[in-house]
Image (cartoon, grey):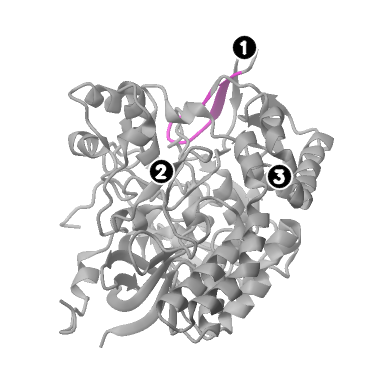
Amino acid sequence: MFHQLTDSGAQALTLTIDGERVTASPGETVASVLLRQESPVARSTPVHGNPRAPYCMMGVCFDCLATVDGVASTQTCLVAVRDGMTVERQHGKRSITA
Amino acid sequence: MTRKYDLTIIGSGPAGMSAAIRASGLGLNVLVVDEQPAPGGQIWRAVEAVADTRTGELLGDEYRAGQDVAQAFRHCGAEYQPNTQVWQLEPGWHIYMSQAQKAEIVQADNVLLATGAQERPAPFPGWTLPGVMTVGAAQITLKVSHQIPTEPVWIAGSGPLVLLYMTQLLKAGGKIAGWLDTAPANSWRRGMPHFLAAMGSWRDMRKGYQWIKGLQAANVPIHRGVRQFSAEGEGRMTHLVYESSDGASHRVPARLLLVHEGVVPSIHMTRSLDCTHTWLPDQACLAPNVDSWGQTSQAGVFAAGDATGIGGARAALVRGEIAAIGVALRLGKINEQEADRLALPLRGKLAKELAIRPMLDAMYPPDQRVFQPSDDTIVCRCEELTAGDIRAAAKVGKPGPNQIKSLTRAGMGPCQGRQCGYTIAHILAAEQKCDVREVGFYRIRPPLKPLTLGELASLDIGDDLP
């Protein structure tokens, strides 16, 4: 849905979203990177399984929750990207066995 | 060992930073915690990294002005702790917070809530679909990632932020497919009675006028008097449907719609502390009652900036300073005469900064439709409850927001009512044919932000706490 005006060039970081390598700029948030992907979806809801993407970008809607470096339900709009970070979209209810 | 401070400030936007600078200058031992990775709040988000870039240039002088404040804040001597979420406050004052999965309790004689504002929730059919975002969210992503919408974007809403973002977007080379302007048709006439009082802010008025002229010159399609609109799509937004002022129905392909109906104070912390609040009819929101120093009804709990009512960044800077002086007075670091002397020029400045507000509030009231969404519109995003669900529950007895919460789970999801509180209150008021201020608001309970059991277990409660 979005594209960057400037290329972060040599400073670019690499993270993975659902195993896929994507580049990011230092200082931006994970949610912001999601908005550049083919699918901006961060999670699906625990109630009806509907897809949600970042909505408010400032920590008050909780629609951008995803698993970041193994921590589920992280507010991706509040987390700055780091090189080597792993992001996984989270789907539906959490399972206690997973 | 519990860390102890004279003052803990929550939030490092304009109010939090200016309070920290002034309080440190007055010799207070200050901790500033903020959930963002860098100081600036939303208005000056990422300003240190962005101010001197091309993006900083297109965001404008008001944005770049934050750089000097952030720099002064960094050097003021206050301890600054970013990436930290506060999830509980207890009398004493004990502040429960988490950083990097580790929880901690900090003690402070005074707390200043500089938590700012959030965009007013504006429900309409389809607003939970990927592809619908707020205007503020799009502007934040411009600030942190230098990014703009790829395709011509649709915008629905009204107010200064809408005009500013569209101006910035055009300057950045973005395209606007159309703007559904939700301001009332008589917006200018509504503003006129407040025009003279606002004259002191003629620079802001001139700027607003230039934004509007710029949009017209760029031939942005402006649709006024739109009767209703919705987002449609399977799994993500693919179409915008709207009924124009002449009653004709339109269905256009659209993958991104940005909405905005003004901003409201962040009240979760003051509500959780049982601070008294007042309904501000001109801004259609609650705000904590504060005295002339920004102290709430709870001794030692101060609030400043937009968290006390929307006034904008420059007013927030002044309110932060006044609160810092108030805290110093309460601690006995300065006497009353000295506090009054320091605050005098600030009070004049604050009155000047707030002068334009009555005009803006009159010109850009929230679209009344956001308070009475159609039955099929989701109002509680977390629990996926519709306005129809709430109305059905409201028919049994005369429930308040807290009974509705128990009956339906509205407001019980991770956002804890931040996205549905006002909508539910307005729906109940309409169903019960009473004023919204009689309905009240959700009772806000900790944790104010979700935390993991691991975080909770990491808490060292020590021996020095009751």
Residue B242 among magenta residues = yes
> Share a chain, discs 1 and 3?
yes
- Camera-side mark, 3 or 2: 3
Residue A48 percent coordinates (x, y): 28, 36
- Camera-side mark, 1 or 3: 3
Res B445 quadrant in image: bottom left
Q: Earlier in the sequence, mark 1 or mark 3?
A: 3
Q: Quadrant of the C terminus of chain B?
A: bottom left
Q: Residue at x 15, y 84 (%)?
A: B463
Left or right: A83 in relation to B64: left
Within 10 Å of the Cα at label 2, are there few (<14), some (14-19), or many (20+) other Cα atoms?
A: many
Image disc number at residue A52: 2
From this viewpoint, which residue is outermost toward the right? B217
Q: What segment is highlighted magenta in the picture?
A: B229-243
**Dot 3 amino acid type:** Ala
Residue A11 percent coordinates (x, y): 62, 74
How far is disc 3 from disc 2 in space, using C-alphas?
A: 44 Å
Within 10 Å of the Cα at label 1, are there few (<14), some (14-19), or many (20+) other Cα atoms?
A: few
Q: Which residue is mark 1?
A: B248
Q: Residue at x 43, y 85 (%)?
A: B29
Q: Residue at x 49, y 57 (%)?
A: B116
Q: Is residue B213 visible?
A: yes
For residue B131, above or below residue B353: above
How far is disc 1 from disc 2 in space, using C-alphas?
A: 31 Å
Name the element at disc 3: helix
